[in-house]
Amino acid sequence: MKKPPLKKVTPSGRADDDATFFAQVYDVVRQIPKGRVTSYGAIAAALGTRGSARMVGWAMNNCHQLTPKVPAHRVVNRLGLLTGKMHFGDPDRMQQLLEKEGVRVANDQVQDFAKKFWDPAQEL
DNA sequence: AGTCTGACTAGTA
DNA sequence: CTACTAGCCAGAC
């Protein structure tokens, strides 16, 4: 077996799988239902790399140049904080997008995060 | 090649 | 409660 289910993959390099870690992240993020959010750690965990939550964020940073655009605004940290809002060009844009989808945001934090939370490992 | 940083998280003090 | 540390992995210097 030279193809393990999912282990440490090399995003910029190449993974043994067809999809790289980044690609898997994008795929998951794009499947987030409207009005729902998830966390970096949840995505990383769903991909089998629980400790690599940072890589998910890194993937998001890279998602700006790829197509189709990734709804990165639906990805927040595990506390529901819009930690990545400053990377959307305009700090308010992330919140605007979330509220537009029915997600209430206050003080850079998603309200009812437990309800809005969408766990890829559970839903997928 | 070594060091620091980062859109994170969990654990410990 | 806050502060710090460790783990994670890739990129910038």
Image: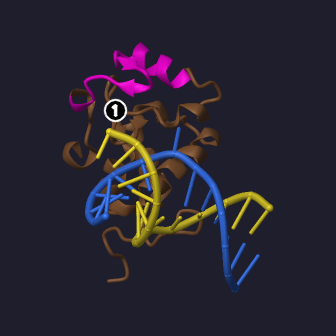
Chain colours: A brown, B blue, C yellow
Left or right: residue A121 versus residue B6 is: left
Nearest to the observer: residue C3 or residue A37: C3
Quadrant for the N terminus of chain A, please.
Answer: bottom left
Count the numbered circles shown: 1
Residue at image coords 42%, 60%: A52
Nearest to the observer: residue A32 or residue C11: C11
Residue A26 at x, y = what percent?
Answer: 46, 46
Residue A39 at x, y = what percent?
Answer: 35, 42
Nearest to the observer: residue A86 or residue C6: C6
Specify the amino acid type for callout 1.
Val
Residue at image coords 34%, 68%: A6
Where is mark 1, residue-wise? A37
Left or right: residue A12 versus residue A7 is: right
**Image position of A11 with respect to A26: above or below:** below
Residue at image coords 53%, 31%: A85
Q: Does the magenta run of residues contain A97? A: yes
Q: Chain of mark 1?
A: A
Residue A30 at x, y = what percent?
Answer: 41, 37
The part of the chain drawn in magenta is A93-114
Residue at image coords 56%, 20%: A92
Label 1 neighbour load within 10 Å: few <14, some 14-19, many 20+: many
**Secondary structure under badge 1?**
loop
Q: Does the magenta run of residues contain A101? A: yes
Left or right: residue A47 versus residue A22 is: left
**Image position of A2 with respect to A7: above or below:** below
